[in-house]
Image (cartoon, helix red, strand yellow):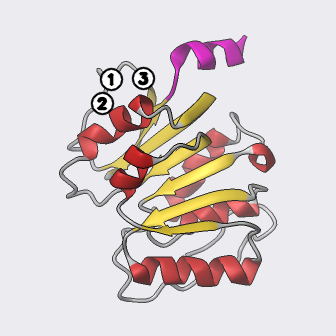
Amino acid sequence: MRIISGTLKGKRFYPPKNIPARPTTDFAKEALFNILNNYFDFSEVKFLDLFAGTGSLDMEIFSRGCTDITSVDMSKISLGFIKKMSEEVKIPNHKIIFGDAVQFAKNCTQQYDLIFAGPPYALEVIDEIPDIIFEKKLLKAAGIFILETSPKHNFVEHPKLLEVRNYGQTHFWFFGDKSESDNESE
């Protein structure tokens, strides 16, 4: 796992072999952050990583200036690795939460500028996650929620869908308040 850009550019981390996660590929991660660079000053972002897995996105966004990061996962192996990396690079106030990411979202009272969810592709409730994010009002105004899925999921009819980007077997669905994103582009 390699950091693509920012203060930690080129740094490598080596997740344990038994980590129960499907890391976002470097190619997809680089493409994702190229898009996000157009929307955010990462130093001002409050970031929530649901299904944090290897913590690759947490390290990438920290390298680009974000210091308000919350990582949620139900794997103690994943969270142990994320905690180790976080301590190594000294992420201040990194909130690492053990628990079910969907339940966390349903009970969360915080709001975030950027939320990323990369659930296991076999998770049965993937199609419900965008609605949970918006029903619980987890996004700040002009915030973006990104859901990573396999090609078998389709959100083109979702009222909050802004765009979708496909990178092989990885689809990134970008959701947000269209009126807020329209105002940002004016």
Q: Nearer the viewer, residue 53 or 150?
A: 53
Front residue of this view, candidates 68 and 88 = 68
How would you classify the magenta stretch by its main secondary structure? helix
Q: From where the camera sits, is residue 164 visible?
A: no
What residue is rendered at 41% in x and 61% in y? 51
Q: Are circles 1 and 2 on residues that touch, CB within 8 Å?
A: yes
**Inter-mark Cα distance, 1 to 3:** 6 Å
Q: Which residues are magenta?
A: 176-186
Rendered image: mark on residue 155: 2
- Label 2: element kind: loop
Quarter of image, res 96? bottom right
Q: Is residue 29 above or below residue 125?
A: below
Three-letter code, disc 2: Phe
Left or right? Give the position of 43 relative to 176.
right
> What secondary structure is marked by label 1?
loop
| Amino acid type for the residue under numbered disc 3 | Lys
Q: Which residue is mark 1?
A: 158
Look at the numbered disc 3 and give the secondary structure of its residue. loop
In the image, residue 3 lies in the stretch drawn in magenta: no
| Image location (x, y in percent) of residue 78 | 45, 78
Q: Are marks 1 and 3 in contact (CB under 8 Å)?
A: yes
The image's mark for residue 160 is 3
